[in-house]
Image: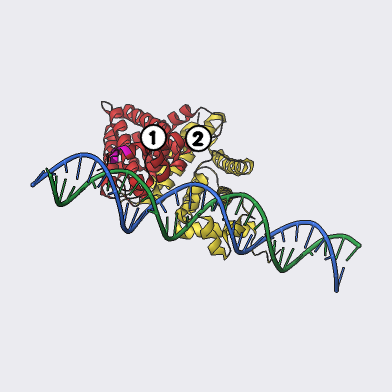
Chain colours: A red, B yellow, C green, D blue
Amino acid sequence: MPSPGLTIDKVVDAALDLMREEGDKALSMSALARRLGVKPPSLYNHVKGVDDLKRAMRLSGLRTLHQHLQAAVVGWSGPDALWAAGQAYRTFAREHPALYSLTLAATEEADEELQAAGQQLLTTLMAMLRGYRLEGDAALHAIRCLRSALHGFVSLEIGGGFAMPLDLDESFDRLLRMLDQSFRAEGSN
Amino acid sequence: MPSPGLTIDKVVDAALDLMREEGDKALSMSALARRLGVKPPSLYNHVKGVDDLKRAMRLSGLRTLHQHLQAAVVGWSGPDALWAAGQAYRTFAREHPALYSLTLAATEEADEELQAAGQQLLTTLMAMLRGYRLEGDAALHAIRCLRSALHGFVSLEIGGGFAMPLDLDESFDRLLRMLDQSFRAEGSN
DNA sequence: CCATTTAACTAATACCTATAGTCTATCAGC
DNA sequence: GCTGATAGACTATAGGTATTAGTTAAATGG
């Protein structure tokens, strides 16, 4: 083996750095190879192609997001947990906008590993809602509302969709209040 | 002029068809030229390049969405208008998933025309909320909640993000109920 | 110490976007 | 009806991308 300078982890990490620094448009096998000081074909010893690379990045993104969420909500319940999770979610998206977009895009062709990572995320969100005493389908519908609201807000925010000169933190707080009140109302059934 | 078979509208329409039929990944100047029975360089007489083409498609998407929304809410107010708008929004996204993603992605580098189209959309949403008697900043924050919820839901839905075997229509209805109750509470201030 | 394997490489293919320059059919004005 | 300008197609070309095939050298294991 001629000086194995690369590992799959180094490749994925470099790809994450590249996308963080230069945006999702700049991510390519060529640019990645340049950054790693290597010729493009060498990358194919570690990833199957650009789609496989993105899949690995998505997996990394899902796991990192999950860790952040879990760290944020541990020890809290009910509204406190909701606010902590909301802030953590939004912070992650703002700090890694390109990765966030990539991660949440196209859950369609998710293999087993990706689905497991998504499932873990869902489990954490479910646990977070435990304080609201939501049962059965109501809890699942509530999760969907929660995910929609969070994903929609951060997507629009990082995409520059909120143009009005109006405090974003305040808007996000109101979004969380809306969720909180909805969960309270549903939970008291 | 050797038989001007192309016009800017034909080009954009063909691009929309191409993306609707084969997905956003299949959209390229080459594929578009093939579909139009023309050589790729000919397209450059009508659009500046692939980015300009996408810009034109985004504009078309924004305007179509706006028309659908306006047609849906006319004659209604309050909750009725909210439900009509929600259904129209979701229907548009489901019928043109690739166009929807393209339209709402990267509002960043929006030129004057795009911003105007976005503004019209916003104006229609504002009018729709009139029945809730929301005033000043409260109305603007409410719009952001509305957009977040709708955009998040349809994005996740068309991306296959909702995997649970649970009725999507029911989930969407609950999302609208959450918005409705929030607007009622805010409006009574 | 040698065989195997790993992971880099070079070379080549087949796309893609985009620009420059050419040619021809149409249209306006005479 | 002729002619000149122009619009809109074309050919040719440059340079970028992903990917595969085949080659070579280094490190490991028996």
From the viewer's side, name the closer residue of C19 and B33: C19
Chain ID at mark 1: A
Residue B80 sits inside the magenta stretch: no
Instruction: Decide: few, some or many residues near mark 2? Use Cα within 10 Å; few <14, some 14-19, many ≥20.
Output: many
Chain ID at mark 2: B
- Direction from residue A14 to residue D6 in the image, left or right: right
- Dots 2 and 1 on the same chain: no
Confirm whether residue B118 shows in the render: yes
Residue A137 numbered tag: none
Q: Main secondary structure of the magenta part?
A: helix
Q: Secondary structure at mark 1?
A: helix
Residues in magenta, as a range: A6-10
Residue depicted at x 54% and y 33%: B140
Residue B139's quadrant in the figure? top right
Residue B94's quadrant in the figure? bottom left
Alpha carbon separation for disc pair 2 and 1 = 36 Å
What's under tag 2, amino acid-wise?
Answer: Ala
The picture places residue C26, in percent across and down from the top left corner, at 75, 66
Q: Quadrant of the N terminus of chain B?
A: bottom right
The picture places residue C14, in percent across and down from the top left corner, at 44, 60
Q: How many marks?
A: 2
Q: Which residue is mark 2?
A: B142
Q: From this view, report whether residue A180 is shown above or below residue B19.
A: above
What's under tag 1, amino acid-wise?
Answer: Asp
Q: Secondary structure at mark 2?
A: helix
- Direction from residue A133 to residue B124 in the image, left or right: right
Q: Which residue is mark 1?
A: A17
The picture places residue B3, in percent across and down from the top left corner, at 68, 66
From the viewer's side, name the closer residue of D3 and B21: D3
